[in-house]
Image (cartoon, grey):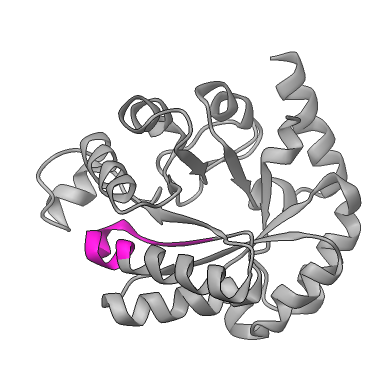
Amino acid sequence: MSWKDKLIIALDVSNADKALGIVDMLGDDVSTYKVGFELFVSSGPSIVERLHEKGKRVFLDLKFHDIPNTVSKAAVAAARLGVFMFNLHASGGCEMMKRCKDRVDEVCLKEKLRRPKIISVTVLTSLDSDSLKNELCVQHGVKAQVKHLSTLAQKAGLDGVVASPQEIAIIKNACGKDFLVVTPGIRPSWVPPDDQHRTATPQAALREGADFIVMGRGVLQHEDPVRALELISLEILTA
């Protein structure tokens, strides 16, 4: 599989026109896009439909986190939108995750829908062990927490997790190579980490075994995003 098949570009922009302009600019180089809070709130579900019309897959990054009944209903709505993948917070607990997965399975089977990948967020890449301990009262470190939440997600029947590149090997060792790991916090060598503490370059994340890498600012804030993809590809292929 080409590294570009594992690439997800984050459409972290304020409106549909900007998002679709990026999609047109990047063309066939990118097949999967992430739609997060800002774009979904500003543009609504229609942005997913418009991306599908352009032949693109959508990772719906809304990080559902609520009581099991509420999350399962939101998950079904995501499945009916036809997204390729969506996520929820593992910290919502095993019952929430399992109820979500079971309900999506049931509806997709009944309505003959393609079942989306369901993954859970472990520990946000903006957090580190000090944040967990001093702010959230989680007494063990990031790696132990990520491992715990990943095994919980697997127990609930989910397809994988969102975690930083630094925890890929830990997750694969604990949950097996077929358990998906989607990694944000991906930065080309020329881009600073900004507000994310646990980052890695694209080639480092892929070398560790990431199934998908999510990139936003590292590509879109470059003066020539198409050239940025070319430079990243060169870095990866010559690593």
Q: Is residue 88 visible?
A: yes
Is 91 part of what is drawn in magenta? Answer: yes
For residue 120, side relative to residue 205 (left or right): left
Pinpoint residue 195: horizontal percent, then vertical percent.
45, 52
Dividing the picture into quadrants, the one containing residue 226 is top right
Image quarter hosting the C terminus: top right
- The residues colored magenta run 86-98
Residue for point 31% across, 81% down:
69
Depicted 188 relative to depicted 47: above or below: above
Question: Principal SS element in the magenta part?
Answer: helix
Image quarter hosting the N terminus: top right
Depicted 68 relative to depicted 143: above or below: below
Residue for point 40% across, 42% down:
197
Q: Is residue 37 visible?
A: no
Dividing the picture into quadrants, the one containing residue 12 is bottom right
For residue 136, side relative to residue 199 (left or right): left
Depicted 196 relative to depicted 65: above or below: above
For residue 30, side relative to residue 110 (left or right): right
Pinpoint residue 230: horizontal percent, then vertical percent.
84, 34
In front here: 190 or 61? 61
In front here: 159 or 102? 102
Pinpoint residue 38: horizontal percent, then vertical percent.
58, 75
Is 174 part of what is drawn in magenta? Answer: no
Residue for point 52% across, 32% down:
200
Pinpoint residue 99: horizontal percent, then vertical percent.
32, 68
- Taking the view exactly as shown, the residue that stands out farthest to the top is 238
Give the total of numbered labels.
Answer: 0
Residue for point 40% across, 63% down:
101
In front here: 83 or 216? 83
